[in-house]
Image (cartoon, rainbow, N blue to C red):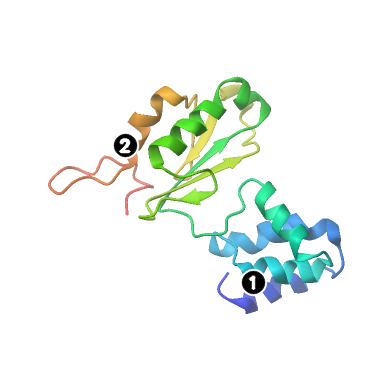
């Protein structure tokens, strides 16, 4: 999505005043750019007929919605029931600590973004995370240092050790 015209095109496909369309519209608006602007949130709230505070609350409470650009190496950790039972909360906490950002944020250098999501539908392989677009199964907190070493850019003169889809 590039600019207000794209948002208006999305809104034109959805009837105005449908409060139940709030979260789906936020997700659809984010899909094109990878994040939502304040103007997006306010315009969607207006379109569906809810106060801006309601839309902002939905953004803050809905996993995966972002208010800043995602990092070049996105990491999304499942916090659904099966993954939580198998330790995804400690994995998420380890990633937050190692990256120095909370879930829903991007590192200051733009290298990583970290998100908590409800479910990937791969509960039998819990805990699950999506790393640079690929699912990783059994990602536990003890494997966080190795994962980040794999994803970090190589130093000058060293081979690039990141997965092909993560390399720039």
Q: Residue furthest bottom?
A: 5
Percent across and percent down for residue 50 are 82, 64
Measure how far apart labels 2 and 1 are at the Cα level: 37 Å
Query: At x 60% / y 48%, what residue is drawn?
Result: 64
- Residue labelled with disc 2: 150
- Residue labelled with disc 1: 39
Q: Is residue 13 in view from this perspective?
A: no
Q: Residue furthest right?
A: 17
The 10 Å Cα crowd at callout 1, few under 14, some 14 to 19, many 20 or more, is: few
Q: Is residue 61 in view from this perspective?
A: yes
In the foreground, 117 or 42: 42
Percent across and percent down for residue 144 are 40, 30
Q: Earlier in the sequence, mark 2 or mark 1?
A: 1
Residue 57: quarter of image? bottom right
Secondary structure, mark 2, is helix
Query: At x 73% / y 56%, what residue is drawn?
Result: 24
The N terminus sits in image quarter: bottom right
Residue 111 relative to residue 28: left or right: left
Percent across and percent down for residue 127 are 55, 26
Residue 122 relative to residue 19: left or right: left
Q: Residue furthest left?
A: 157
């Amino acid at each position: 999505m590039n600019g207000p015209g794209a948002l208006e095109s999305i809104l034109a496909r959805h009837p105005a005043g449908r409060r139940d369309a709030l979260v789906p519209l936020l997700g659809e608006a984010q899909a094109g750019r990878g994040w939502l602007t304040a103007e997006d949130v306010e315009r969607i709230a207006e379109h569906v007929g809810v106060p801006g505070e309601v839309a902002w609350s939905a953004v803050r409470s809905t996993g995966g919605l972002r208010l800043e650009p995602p990092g070049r190496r996105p990491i999304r950790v499942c916090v659904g029931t099966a993954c939580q039972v198998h330790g995804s909360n400690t994995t998420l906490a380890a990633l937050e600590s190692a990256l120095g950002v909370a879930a829903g944020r991007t590192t200051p250098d733009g290298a990583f973004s970290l998100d908590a999501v409800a479910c990937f539908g791969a509960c039998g392989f819990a805990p699950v995370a999506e790393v640079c677009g690929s699912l990783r199964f059994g990602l536990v907190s003890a494997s966080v240092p190795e994962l980040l070493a794999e994803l970090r850019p190589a130093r000058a003169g060293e081979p690039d050790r990141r997965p092909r889809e993560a390399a720039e």
